Image (cartoon, rainbow, N blue to C red):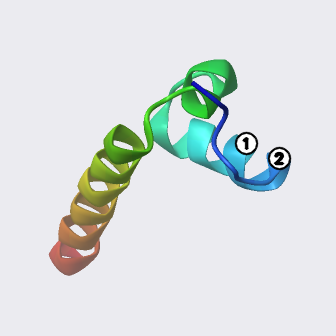
């Protein structure tokens, strides 16, 4: 499996937000990454609406 086509800065930010190592992020299947990003967006949305 080839690494995701994202920049180094994006990889660092995503790994920090998703709390996973960069190596795991870069070799994660794209559909799983999209699912995790959707979950992250949903939790941020619910957090912001609680304020």
Dividing the picture into quadrants, the one containing residue 41 is: bottom left
Please indicate whether residue 14 sits to the left or right of residue 32 in the image. Answer: right
Q: How many marks?
A: 2
The residue located at (28%, 59%) in the rendering is 38
Q: Nearer the viewer, residue 44 or 50?
A: 44
Q: Nearer the viewer, residue 14 or 27?
A: 27
C-alpha gap between disc 1 and disc 2: 6 Å
- Residue 18 position within the rendered picture, expressed as x and y whole percent measured from the top left: 46, 39
Q: Are marks 1 and 2 in contact (CB under 8 Å)?
A: yes
Q: Secondary structure at mark 2?
A: helix
Q: Which residue is mark 2?
A: 8
Please indicate whether residue 41 sits to the left or right of residue 5 in the image. Answer: left
The residue located at (60%, 39%) in the rendering is 16
Residue 12's disc number: 1
User: Within 10 angstroms of label 2, few (less than 14), some, or many (20 or more) residues?
Assistant: few
Establish if 42 lies above or below 24: below
Dividing the picture into quadrants, the one containing residue 27 is: top right
Please indicate whether residue 39 sits to the left or right of residue 5 in the image. Answer: left
- Which of pointers 1 and 2 indicates the residue nearer the eye? 2
User: Within 10 angstroms of label 1, few (less than 14), some, or many (20 or more) residues?
Assistant: some
Q: Furthest-front residue in view?
A: 1
The residue located at (57%, 24%) in the rendering is 1
- Residue 35 position within the rendered picture, expressed as x and y whole percent measured from the top left: 27, 49
- Residue 11 position within the rendered picture, expressed as x and y whole percent measured from the top left: 69, 44
Q: Furthest-right residue in view?
A: 8
Q: Secondary structure at mark 1?
A: helix
- Residue 46 position within the rendered picture, expressed as x and y whole percent measured from the top left: 18, 68
Establish if 42 lies above or below 49: above
The residue located at (25%, 52%) in the rendering is 39
């Amino acid at each position: 499996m080839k690494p995701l086509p994202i920049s180094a800065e994006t990889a660092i930010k995503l790994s920090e937000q998703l709390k996973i190592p960069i190596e795991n992020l870069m070799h994660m299947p794209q559909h799983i990454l999209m699912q995790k990003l959707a979950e992250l967006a949903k939790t941020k949305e619910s957090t912001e609406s609680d304020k």
